[in-house]
Image (spheres, rainbow, N blue to C red):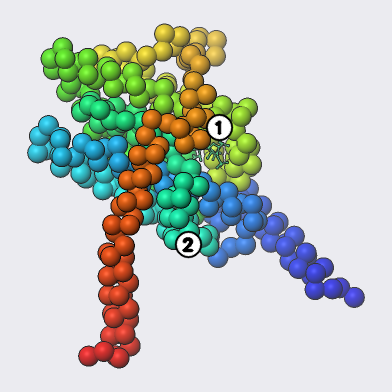
């Protein structure tokens, strides 16, 4: 006789075969579909970290909204920072379809347990940092995220399509800020170059550790969540930056950067991985400040969440006809 445990093993084997077939044929896995636990966990990990990055990522630029050099620059920067909030919300929603609650993710972020992108732990002391973030950080985000539009998990891939369109505008506005500065005074050119000097290496590190130290890449690529390795994307990013830096008249701060005819790619200097891992351990220049700011904002927003919940409760009662 077949026991219930045997039957469930047969069901799981069938379900896994269906899952593998969907992934192999570039079909999407949707929230209602069966999926291996490890696939679900990996997605929750990556999507929630990505959402946290967008939310924490509002802070370095939010720092300049009150000091933008013109009304037009201020309006553009506000729109960009609002887009980042929106990206965070689509991503939290995508993660919620996998069974994790928004409250759990928020707790993980404000308690300091969750990771978010290393890049947002660096300071923004000058206006040129707004240009460097747009050009380099959003530029890196696009290179990393365009392949994620084809991620095997439907809600993540679909969120990425809209995110990438907006990142593309962000990248251009950053380039345009730097171009304006580079066409300005000597002091403005120096400010632009200084910002690029500070953001260049951390933006390369955004792609994650080198392939031989990236524990998650191989499996994520098998599941078609990631399509390219960290090093491949980093290489693609540098290839994109070089001609743009020439147009800007900016020097990329890597004396070892040069075209290699044999490999058909740029050779580059070594990234400071010790610095990267220190930032991941919470010891970057702004980790403590970023988390403290998020925690305070969360506490200060408690009354808004309570009011919204109460409004929703009353609306629901009204719909049910219980309140006049
Ligand atoms: N920072 O095995 P891998 C943006 C962690 S959004 C911190 O290679 P994986 C928009 C990694 O989580 C920027 N941690 O991991 C914007 C893992 O730890 P775990 C965010 C990092 O997942 C612009 C461990 O190291 N973008 O910029 C970082 O296969 C301007 C081992 O690494 C995304 O999240 C890092 N840089 O590959 C907003 C894109 N790199 O979880 C505002 C989606 C690695 O095992 C202003 N995510 N780690 O404890 C991804 O594509 C991947 O998750 C990678 C990492 C490529 C980030």
Residue receiving disc 2? 101
Q: Where is residue 26 shown, x and y percent of the image?
A: 57, 48
SS for dot 2: loop
Note whether residue 45 is visible: yes
Q: CA distance from mark 2 to mark 1?
A: 29 Å
Q: Is residue 124 above or below residue 98?
A: above
Disc tally is 2
Q: Nearer the viewer, mark 2 or mark 1?
A: 2
Closest to the observer, 298 or 64:
298
Closest to the observer, 262 or 236:
236
Residue shown at 64%/42% (left/top)?
219
Q: Which mark is residue 229?
A: 1
Whichever of callouts 2 and 1 sits on the residue coming sooner in the sequence is 2
Residue shown at 51%/35% (left/top)?
281
244 relative position to 92: left or right: left
SS for dot 1: loop
Q: Where is residue 15 shown, x and y percent of the image?
A: 69, 61
């Amino acid at each position: 006789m077949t026991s219930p445990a045997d039957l469930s093993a047969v069901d799981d084997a069938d379900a896994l075969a269906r899952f593998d077939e969907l992934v192999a044929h570039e079909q999407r896995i949707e929230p209602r579909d069966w999926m291996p636990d490890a696939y679900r966990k990996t997605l929750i990990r990556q999507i929630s970290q990505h959402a946290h990055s967008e939310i924490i990522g509002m802070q370095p630029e939010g720092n300049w909204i009150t000091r933008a050099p013109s009304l037009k620059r201020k309006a553009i920067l506000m729109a960009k920072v609002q887009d980042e909030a929106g990206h965070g919300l689509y991503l939290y929603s995508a993660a919620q379809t996998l069974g994790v609650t928004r409250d759990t993710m928020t707790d993980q972020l404000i308690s300091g347990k969750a990771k978010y992108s290393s890049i947002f732990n660096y300071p923004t002391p000058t206006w040129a940092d707004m240009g460097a973030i747009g050009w380099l950080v959003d530029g890196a985000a696009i290179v990393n995220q365009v392949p994620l539009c084809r991620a095997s998990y439907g809600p993540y891939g679909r969120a990425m399509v809209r995110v990438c369109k907006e990142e593309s505008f962000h990248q251009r506005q950053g380039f345009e800020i730097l171009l304006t500065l580079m066409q300005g005074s000597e002091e403005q050119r120096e400010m632009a170059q200084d910002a690029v000097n500070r953001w260049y290496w951390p933006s390369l590190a955004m792609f994650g550790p080198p392939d031989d130290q990236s524990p998650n890449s191989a499996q994520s690529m098998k599941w078609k969540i990631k399509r390219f390795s960290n090093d491949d994307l980093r290489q693609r990013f540098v290839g994109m930056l070089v001609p743009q830096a020439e147009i800007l008249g900016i020097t990329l701060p890597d004396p070892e950067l040069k075209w290699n005819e044999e490999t058909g790619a740029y050779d580059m200097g070594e990234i400071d991985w010790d610095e990267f891992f220190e930032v991941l351990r919470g010891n970057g220049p702004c980790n403590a400040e970023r988390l403290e700011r998020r925690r305070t904002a969360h506490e200060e927003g408690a009354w808004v969440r309570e009011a919204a919940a109460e409004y929703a409760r009353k609306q629901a009662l009204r719909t049910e006809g219980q309140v006049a």
